[in-house]
Image (cartoon, rainbow, N blue to C red):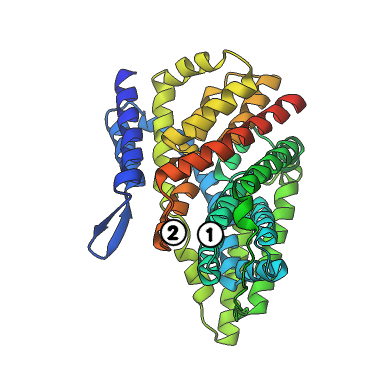
Amino acid sequence: MIATLIISIVTFVGITLSILLFPHIRIGRFRLDTYWAIALIGAILLIATSLAPIQEVWSQLTSPNEVNPLKIIVLFFSMTFLSVFLDETGLFRVLAKLAAKEAKDSQLSLFFIFYLLASALTAFTSNDVVILTLTPFICFFCKNTKIDPLPFLIAEFAAANTWSMALIIGNPTNIYLGTSAHINFFSYIKVMILPTLAAGGVELLIIFLLFRKKLMSPLTIVEDDFHVESKVDLWVGIAHLAVCLIFLSISSYLHIEMWAVSLSCAVSLMIFIVIMRLVTKRHWNYIGDSLKRLPYQLIPFFLSMFVIVVAWNAQGLSSTVSQYLSQGPTVFVYGATSYLASNVINNIPMSILFSNLMSGYTGTQYIQAVYATIIGSNIGAFLTPLGALAGIMFSSLLMKHEVRFTFLKFVKYGVVVSVPTLATALLVLFAIV
């Protein structure tokens, strides 16, 4: 048990330091993200020392149940491909352009429109996709109009990591925790819609109050001559995403697993676009560029953290920690600890770990623990950049676009916005479950 704990702590500390001090290293022409490499080394050590029994790791990787980590990865990547494809066709650029046009010369109107846009896109795609697509647009737009990008970037990031709670597909952590608890699409919405609405309202009010003076200044809209290159591809992509969402919502009634639905839609889209290219002789960029943009580093990171959790279970660490978490109101204990733990070990490994910690619970207590952890995993992403992959990507994009947003500034705004947002969501959850 002690050896497992030491290797795990060293791995978590190493991941944190790598993100803060040396997030990337270059090997020739290739750039390597260090955080997943360190996680992989920790997992290999646990397997090599038999602290994570290889038979147990293999058994869970080949398990037919829905919690199989490979199925979770397929579901997430399929949904991400559909969303990134839509971005490649220009959908998000068009929506952002329409939002700017609708706001006219009002920063305040633009602020609310961008928040609503980020919220809606997050709910139906995922928080990672919103960060990847809207962040560069906001940086370019604010630079061209000579306005402070901070209110819009904070609103976007906060919205992306709060409204991602609304649907089970909004965040990989939702998918993993919801699937582990055998929660279907509609059952999830029934519980999470009210905490999400309440948290989103509180969050929006706080951000508005923080930046209200800056937002009162007018802006000059710069004309954007961007146009959609292929409307056929755009509408085909929208149709595939819509069909995917519909079948995900009824998958439990059809006895079809969610990963199979999302994979079928992603493959169908690929086949359709390939056929269109062969017929029309047009370029293949949409598929190639979409595949290049997928967050492949998530695969070794996710699987490495899964191995660490297997080791914790095998060595009895999970049951020990679970005993401490059983003290006090389940909603607030699991909500607060998952929120904080996300910023120590990242929200994906936290979710894998916590799904095991609560496995001994039953009935209402189990449901409370699951949904409270989902809330903590989403809102915890805005306490520090370490809380989620979205935070790591967000910080990297801001650095690339020369927007100064230090770690300390992230934490300052994160505490002010996320703490009351978390408290609101947990209070509503406690009242309804």
Query: Few, some or many C-alpha atoms within 10 Å of disc 1 (few <14, some 14-19, many ≥20)?
Result: some
User: Of the residues shown, which amino acid type is indicated by label 1?
Assistant: Pro
- Say above or below: 23 vs 143: above
> Residue drawn 55% across and 84% down?
282
> Residue drawn 57% across and 13% down?
327
Measure the alpha-carbon separation of dots 1 and 2: 8 Å
Locate the N terminus by quadrant: top left
Q: Nearer the viewer, residue 334 or 260?
A: 334
- Say above or below: 119 vs 233: above
Which residue is identified by label 2?
403
Could you say where residue 35 lies in the image, as x and y percent from the top left?
35, 45
Please give left or right for residue 264 compared with residue 255 in the image: left
Which residue is identified by label 1?
149
Q: Are marks 1 and 2 in contact (CB under 8 Å)?
A: yes
Could you say where residue 83 lies in the image, as x and y percent from the top left?
59, 61
- Say above or below: 423 vs 409: above
Please give left or right for residue 202 compared with residue 19 in the image: right
Q: Indicate the secondary structure of the residue bearing disc 1.
A: loop
Please give left or right for residue 23 compared with residue 423 in the image: left
Could you say where residue 5 lies in the image, as x and y percent from the top left?
34, 23
